[in-house]
Amino acid sequence: MSRHLIVAIRATLITLVVTGVLYPLLVTGIAQVLFPSQAKGSLVTDERGQVVGSELLAQGFAQRGYFQPRPSAAGEKGYDGTASGASNFGPTSKKVAERAAAEADRLRRENPSAPGPIPAALVTASGSGLDPHISPDAAFWQIPRVAAARSVAASRVRSLVEEEIEGRGLGIFGEPRVNVLVLNLALDRQFGRPVPGAEARSK
């Protein structure tokens, strides 16, 4: 009996060391060599070299001179990376309809010059609540507000958006999209940071 117990303990310890220590270290080491940025969380830095977020996680942008992501149901105030998830309400839920209507009203107030109807993605949260991307149409729709807040021509902002559009994975997977954080950092690099409360005027 004791012999079987010793064998079982030995097998457990070996398995624990191999699968719980050596394998994770090996995979982490390979990832650090081949994909260093992704292995560290796809962190994004600003022009001063300070980490401002991750390409994988959405964050809220309330200032008029920045593009806004999809709404978020992650956490009490949204965009909480420790509380990823959806509201779990169904498509016929009254709360979902009320939330979407409230988002639509806010977007209309903040984007009076936006062309056409509001893109659906701007009034609905993603499954994780942390989707960092919006569709090109959702970005184009916000251009008048962003351009006015930064006092630049809308055509210049549109050109920047077009440069930041990411294509389908391997040319076939997913849909074209725009990473909101990356786009907003590109705005700051090209036009400088917007002045809060500044009078909006077009050049």
Image (tube, rainbow, N blue to C red):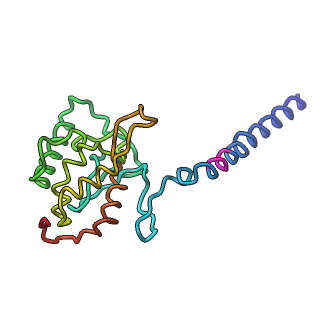
Q: Quadrant of the N terminus?
A: top right
**Drawn side of residue 161 relative to residue 115, left or right:** right
Q: Is residue 30 magenta?
A: yes
**Drawn side of residue 58 relative to residue 148, left or right:** right
Which residue corresponds to the image point at 83% horizontal and 37% vertical from the top-left?
Answer: 10
Q: Which residue is outermost to the right? A: 3
**Drawn side of residue 52 relative to residue 65, left or right:** right
Which percent across, then down, holds residue 6? 86, 35
Which residue corresponds to the image point at 41% horizontal and 62% vertical from the top-left?
Answer: 52
Residue 147: which quarter of the image?
Answer: bottom left
Which percent across, then down, holds residue 123? 21, 42
Q: Nearer the viewer, residue 20 or 24?
A: 24
Characterize the magenta stretch by its predominant secondary structure.
helix
Number of numbered discs overlaid on the protein picture: 0
Which residue corresponds to the image point at 17% horizontal and 61% vertical from the top-left?
Answer: 153
Magenta range: 27-31
Which percent across, then down, holds residue 5? 84, 32
Q: Quadrant of the C terminus?
A: bottom left
Which percent across, then down, holds residue 33? 64, 52
Residue 44: which quarter of the image?
Answer: bottom left
**Drawn side of residue 111 relative to residue 88, left or right:** left
Residue 12: which quarter of the image?
Answer: top right
Q: Is residue 100 magenta?
A: no
